[in-house]
Image (cartoon, rainbow, N blue to C red):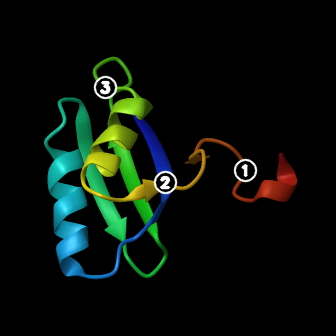
Amino acid sequence: MKQVTLKVQGMSCGSCVNKIEGNVGKLRGVESVEVLLSEGEVDVTFNENTVDLSGIKGAIKDSGYEVMEEPAEEDGPGCSCCH
């Protein structure tokens, strides 16, 4: 399993959360999805052999939101200055 955090723009309410969690969560290979509304982030845990990151980003875009940047990988150090 792989875990990524995506920065997503345009989320503003509980309906946004439900829409993204529903659309991403129904993708085959996605184990969990959690929208952090106050942070503007979406945490996704998925099986790389079943679904790829572009498919997840596509589901978010199809929901009407914009993915801002490449994901912050949770595998490495916790801050950008340590890379």
Distance from disc 1 to disc 2, alpha carbons, whole Å, reads: 17 Å
Please state if 56 lies on the left or on the right of 7 as rendered.
left
Q: Which residue is mark 1?
A: 77
Which residue is under mark 3?
Answer: 51
Q: Amino acid at mark 3?
A: Val
Classify 39 as above or below 24: below
Quadrant position of residue 64 = bottom left
Q: Quadrant of the N terminus?
A: top left
Q: Amino acid at mark 1?
A: Pro
- Between disc 2 and disc 3, whose residue precedes? 2
Q: Residue 40, labelled with which disc?
A: none
Q: Which tag, 1 or 2, sits closer to the chain's start? A: 2
Q: CA distance from mark 1 to mark 3?
A: 25 Å
Residue farthest to the top, as pictured: 49
Q: Residue at x 34, y 80 (%)?
A: 12
Q: Nearer the viewer, residue 64 or 13?
A: 64
Which residue is painted at 31% across and 26% down in the image?
Answer: 51
Q: Residues within 10 Å of mark 1 (few under 14, many from 20)?
A: few
Quadrant in which the C terminus appears: top right
What residue is disc 2 on? 6
Secondary element at image label 2: strand
Going by the numbered disc 2, the residue's amino acid type is: Leu
How crowded is the residue under tag 3: few (<14 C-alpha within 10 Å), some, or many (20+)?
some
Q: Nearer the viewer, residue 8 or 5?
A: 8
Per the image, label 1 sits on a secondary structure element best described as loop
The tag earlier along the polypeptide, 1 or 3, is 3
